[in-house]
Amino acid sequence: MLGQIDAIANIAVKDLAVARRFYEDTLGLRPSGGQDDEVAVYCSGQTRLFVYRSDFAQTNQATALSWAVGPRVDELARALKAKGVAFEHYTMPGMTLEEDVHVGAGHRIAWFRDPDGNILSLVGE
């Protein structure tokens, strides 16, 4: 029923101004209308992302959003690190850490957080 319809990712934040700087300046997302004091709307490829102010921000402890970047995981992780992004390092069965990228089972994944602690990732092969 919904398999052919685009979905929208939602990210809760406490301070929308800080979040806007991170998503626009650090990650390079482009605003896509619908901006106000409570929500910022972005496009990332064909995906839309709603970053919205919420009293429940900073409560998620799982990955909220991933970008499928193919073979560019390492390159993009280095570029984000150069912009001040700190990467998460986890101990996971079957995965090893190469710099900031977790490698295993045919995947390369780099996890990082936005200013509100939302966990984001770059995923590739």
Image (cartoon, rainbow, N blue to C red):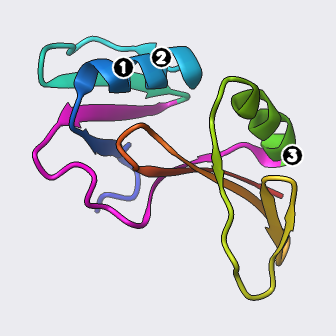
Helix, strand or loop under label 2: helix
| Residue 73 in sight in this render | yes
Disc 2 vs disc 1: Cβ atoms closer than 8 Å?
Answer: yes
Quadrant in the rendering for residue 20: top left
Q: Amino acid at mark 3?
A: Pro
Confirm whether the magenta stretch covers residue 54.
Answer: yes
Q: Which mark is residue 71?
A: 3
Q: Amino acid at mark 1?
A: Arg
Q: Circle 2 is placed at which residue position? A: 24
Q: Residue at x 46, y 24 (%)?
A: 22
Q: Residue at x 24, y 25 (%)?
A: 16
Task: Using a 10 Å C-alpha cutoff, classify the residue at mark 1 as few (fewer than 14 neighbours), some (14 to 19) or many (20 or more).
Answer: many
Question: Viewed as shown, does residue 85 lie left or right of 71?
Answer: left
Tell which circle, 3 or 2, labels the residue nearer the N-terminal end: 2
CA gap between label 2 and label 1 equals: 6 Å
Which numbered mark, 1 or 3, is in the foreground of this view? 1
Q: Residue at x 74, y 88 (%)?
A: 93
Task: Using a 10 Å C-alpha cutoff, classify the residue at mark 3 as few (fewer than 14 neighbours), some (14 to 19) or many (20 or more).
Answer: few
User: Which range is magenta?
Assistant: 46-70
Q: Please, is residue 21 above or below residue 86 in the view?
A: above
Quadrant in the rendering for residue 18: top left
Question: Viewed as shown, does residue 26 lie left or right of 42?
Answer: right
